[in-house]
Amino acid sequence: MACGRAFEGAVAALRATPSLCLAVHVTLVEERPVSAPSAIPSLVGPDGSFLPNYGRFLRRFLAGAIRSQELRREIVGQVERIYAAGLLPLHLNSHQHLHMLPRIWEIVLQIAEDFHIPMVRLSRFQQPWEGWPFSDWPFRAGLNRLAARAAARAAQRAIAARLVATVGLDVAGHLGREKLLHILRRLPTGVHELVVHPGVEDPELRARYTWGYDWSGELEALCSPLGDELQRLGIQLESCKT
């Protein structure tokens, strides 16, 4: 998250752990842009920050008030900030899945091509009708429709980047060990990206992001012994550096 508050700390952690792959987590809501607000007025509010949530962004986007040239300027700026830190991004995705929206998707694909980023996230739900609340189902159905359209558009362009479909969105923020094993046992053939939010509980983090995510529980699930189960299921962990 090139415009995130923890960017410098993330850069230091990545430099200290060169085996980790790096993704650009394109951010268009909640944070402050890397561009001057005056250069991207359609993306920001009166205080120069991005809009506070994807709902506000979506309303402005559907009204035709988000300018494509400003989207490209800001996204390129975020990618360039990561390169300027001496890091090589090999994957591109977005906060709140906003890169899946038409127009933004085309811009993101072109930027991935321009910067030779070999993988782009295709955000979709494996089981959109499982779980609660029911009020979340329209969002899930809508994201899956966008994913189908995005895949078709990418096929038409014959892009160089690989589209990597997500698993785990169905239980985002609540991926305990049993749920993780459930996902792995139902994993279809192909290359997939497991979306997880591991972290350490922090009062400031909890106050800022009120999603109710169990960051420490997801960290514990990922650190639990899984090798035997992965081998039994024939699942191979693939580094995006290979």
Image: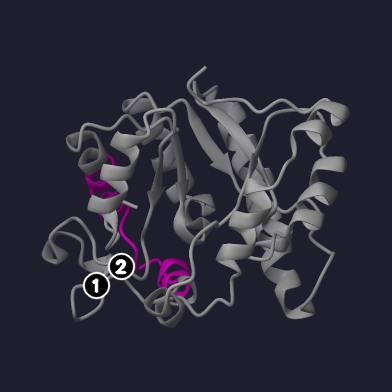
Q: Is residue 128 above or below residue 228?
A: below
Judged left or right of residue 172, residue 69 is: left
The mark nearer the N terminus, 2 or 1, is 2
Could you tell me how far apart the alpha carbons at marks 2 and 1 are, in whole angstroms?
6 Å
Q: Is residue 150 magenta?
A: no
Residue visible at 81% across and 29% down in the picture: 189
- What residue range appears in magenta? 57-79
Q: Are marks 2 and 1 in contact (CB under 8 Å)?
A: yes
Predominant SS of the magenta segment:
helix
Magenta-span inclusion, residue 75: yes
In the rendered image, residue 163, in percent from the top left (x then y), is placed at: 59, 32
Q: Nearer the viewer, residue 134 or 18?
A: 18
Measured as percent of width and height from the top left, residue 61 is found at: 43, 66
Q: Is residue 186 visible?
A: no
Amino acid found under the numbered disc labelled 1: Ser
The residue labelled by disc 2 is 31
Query: What type is the residue that disc 2 sits on?
Result: Glu
Say whether residue 226 is left or right of residue 79.
right
Secondary structure state at the residue bearing disc 1? loop
Instruction: Residue at 34%, 39% (x, y): give it.
Output: 14
Q: For mark 1, what is the residue? A: 49
Question: Residue 194 at x, y = what percent?
Answer: 65, 44
Using the rendered view, name the quadrant where residue 207 is placed.
bottom left
Q: Residue 30, located in which quarter of the rendered image? A: bottom left
* Few, some or many residues within 10 Å of mark 2 (<14, 14–19, 20+): some
